[in-house]
Amino acid sequence: MNVHHGRVVGVNGNLVTAEFEQPVKQNEVTYVCIGDLRLKSELIRIRGRYAEMQVFEDTSGLRAGDAVEFTGELLSAELGPGLLGQVYDGLQNPLPQLAEECGFFLQRGRYLPALDRTRKWSFTPVATNGATVRSGDTLGTIPEGIFQHRVMVPFGLAGPLTVASIAHAGEVTVESVVARLRDAAGEERDVRVMQRWPVKVPIRAYQERLRPSEPLITKVRIVDTFFPVARGGTYCIPGPFGAGKTVLQQITSRNADVDIVIVAACGERAGEVVETLREFPELTDPRTGRSLMERTLIICNTSSMPVAAREASVYLGVTVAEYYRQMGLNVLLLADSTSRWAQALREVSGRLEEIPGEEAFPAYLESVIAAFYERGGVVRLRDGATGSVTIGGTVSPAGAKFEEPVTQATLKVVGAFHGLSRERSDARRYPAIHPLESWSKYASVVPSADVEHGRRMLRRGNDVGQMMKVVGEEGTSLDDFVVFLAAEYLDASYLQQDAYHDVDAATPAERQAHVYARIHGILRTPMKFPDKDAARRFFQRLTQATNDWNRTPWASPEFAAAERKIDAMVGEVAAVQVKQ
Amino acid sequence: MNTVYTKVEQIVGNVITVNASDVGYRELAQVTSTLGTSLAQVIRLEGGRVFLQVFAGSRGIATDAQVRFLGHPMQVPFSEALLGRIFTGSGVPRDAGPTLDHGMIEIAGPSVNPSKRIIPRRMVRTGIPMIDVFNTLVESQKLPIFSVAGEPYNPLLARIALQAEVDVIVLGGMGLKHDDYLFFRDTLEQQGSLSRTVMFVHTASDPVVECLMVPDLALAVAEKFALEKKRVLVLLTDMTNFSDALKEIAITMEQIPSNRGYPGDLYSQLAARYEKAVDFDAAGSITILAVTTMPGDDVTHPVPDNTGYITEGQFYLRNGRIEPFGSLSRLKQFVNGRTRDDHRTLMNVMIQIYAACKESREKRSMGFRMSAWDKKLLDYGDKFESGMMDLTVNIPLEQALELGWRILADCFEPAETGISTKLIDKFWPKGDRTQAPAATPAPVPVAAATR
Ligand SMILES: Nc1ncnc2c1ncn2[C@@H]1O[C@H](COP(=O)(O)OP(=O)(O)OP(=O)(O)O)[C@@H](O)[C@H]1O
Ligand SMILES: [Mg+2]
């Protein structure tokens, strides 16, 4: 479609109405012009001769009569080598390069290409002349950091195609033509290294979708053991402010056992992104020995950046995730916070004067959230390899109430729920995931019967704790009191984890299996104590010893020694031995 | 450009409508009516109609009032001459000084490119142990004081401002009681700090629209100073009044409210202001300390709730004290690892024991028996509250840490605290109960209002 123009007739915040003459398209990209400034926008409603657009920038100074440029293209991402390690805004502008051009402040109307046009890459052909290919098939590869980046048949091309020509091995840029493909009608077209894809449309160039079955190890014990996440699964982290959503995502972005992590900072604090931005280049990825930044992409549309681009930022994130999934990689997308995106939808909906739903969110909120999480999944590609996109989103419920619409809409569609509780974060019981309210539909790294037993212990301990608040310690039987202490022990020495300790911060799966088996064994050991004080003292010492154990390096002599110490302590109070 | 329009089509709330062309969104206009001239800002364009929000309110505006568009958005003068001056929410002098009209800068400018920010690393010393020891304030932090009405939040703000080692103080007052405005002015003057202060003050009796402008004016000026390598402290009191002004205007504009009447963009509106807090790479910084009064002491009320999601922690002011529970400085870990090697441990241990003390108090109030351990905890709680929590205490961090050790030593055996032997050996006070170090009097007495 050709670029054509319209005229501004109304401005209400970032909602601009324009009059047009030639055909326009829902969700096409438009540019609203203030003199030389072209402000990127998206057409979101058409009524008669009027197009309504959400502008991704501040609209100050816009006048009635100003020009609007209709591009006919949907909002798209640039996909190609060089995405990893980048820091983009929600519209895929590289922020460090923008800073070089514009200095301290973001300037509206300044857009830069997402991928460096001059950088040289080394291309190796895979497809051969005359071969039949389909969208998503590999034409050639390019080493990108630790990965073999696949140059693929554009996802938008339909039907079987014939390779009319393919480039030899050699240096290319993202704009180089590396192949010519011929369709059934005999028409030929060039394929470049880089392709563009509309961010709101899922990439479907795969054989089939599979059920998520493999665990995604986050190295957070309460997650992997009690509320696991699966590769290709989806999960959410709702919680009141300050409960630890961002910290949990930050440690997951470091430690998760996946190939690529995409961090979408959506409408939250800029300072938090700066931490990742400044620290990741210094940190090494234990899997590869290379900088963590090489497997990370940061999309950063923080709270004071244009509100309308929040939505674009999460879609950009999931589109890039799907792109790398097409290369047979496991990708984790972390979105913080999906509530800010929902609020952006609400702002636009309000300006459009749509009939509001609960808490003024638009009626389509649920379906939008569902469609977003549906983009997570494991797929089998046509070459037999599998790839996955796992999505973890935080939710920031208004008034800390999980009954609110965004939390509820999210809970309906995700596979795991990590609910953070104010009580636990106030008590500094980190990570503050509530062990009785959270759930997961995925498989744990330890046998499920053992996990169930642990859960029962926690529930019983909680019941006794509640009762004790009424009748006091005096009114509680010794047996009940021991149940309470044992549950507290499981909580303190396994569920809680020190995010800032080198060893304790990340517990690999085997270690979790080993440690949980031991703790579970302790919980099943009948114990005898002369009185409550003795029981309390024992569990205090045991907790201390287990926490020390958690801080010893895995499979080290210290680890073994700490374990023996715990065994000995338990041996002293085990009911069988005290019998005599 | 400066065509004068004299036909007001509609007046609803503080918003008037005229038919005009070639008017920019957010442009300013002067509206002249029988009661004088007021600034107004374009808040909507629709067909040929222009909606203007009149700063002084619409009272007395006639349908033939003169509307003259100025061709630019809201601006504020910027120069060294601002220091020591006091302005209204329209940017008009409130003091006897001259009108400033050179070096005009636009307010509510674009946000800082995140890649130009740096991880903050300097502590802001306040002399208040509950802040310095337990919830350290960090340069470039944005932090509100959550408080119910009647608490001494303004004296607390003034005190922090006076003791903080900053180059420039910018005060934004919104819905300020006239007495409180005078209190700030006089206190800063008496302590010789007025000459490094700029004040933008909207008092409770001023037009509500002006209230909305105050944070933007204050922050635009702060940003300029910060770019000139100044360390700037911005005080905003009270952001709940600002939010209520937003609410009032949203409702007159017939926007659909999201929560208890507040507009759906409350989060974005507050964030746009708070996110101006910054530590610039190779320039100065902006630290924002705000007051958020909590209607009905309810932290889930939309204003404190949205604020908590934006700021980097909060101080709870209750019964004239900064509560250790609920108060949080999310940036403290950037600085408290480099103050003194006992800082973090003492911070954690003292709070943990205080939490245990609260449990003992609860048990006591329910009539359960107090063990010897309970009694120790109760004793500790009293000493902690009077020695550390009391806002009249005014001592530097190092003295506060010493005092912390002394309180622990007065109440416990070293092993009972769970502190590592290494630190005990180094810091546990030898000798017997010593006198608490003498405190310097606080520059501003902060006492709970009597109720
Ligand atoms: N696992 C943890 N270990 C230690 N401290 C933690 C942990 N999680 C959170 N905290 C503490 O809580 C503070 C707030 O955590 P975080 O920023 O993750 O909250 P949040 O839930 O993302 O809040 P918001 O919704 O306001 O963004 C942190 O700055 C840190 O002091
Ligand atoms: Mg967060």
Image (tube, coloured by chain):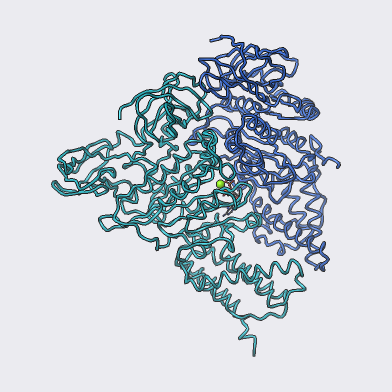
Residue furthest bottom in the image: A580
Q: Position of residue A520 (x, y in %)?
A: 54, 73
Residue at the image position 34 percent from the left and 24 percent from the top: A4
A498 w.r.t. A167: above or below:
below
Question: Quadrant of the image for the N terminus of chain A?
Answer: top left
Residue furthest front in the image: A48
Q: Position of residue A32 (x, y in %)?
A: 43, 25
Q: Position of residue B403 (x, y in %)?
A: 76, 50
**Foreground of the two, A241 or A572:** A241
Residue at the image position 60 percent from the left and 36 percent from the top: B256
Residue at the image position 30 percent from the left and 36 percent from the top: A119
**Foreground of the two, A166 or A554:** A166
Residue furthest right in the image: B450
A391 w.r.t. B238: above or below:
below
Q: Is residue A308 visible?
A: yes
Q: Which chain is blue?
A: B
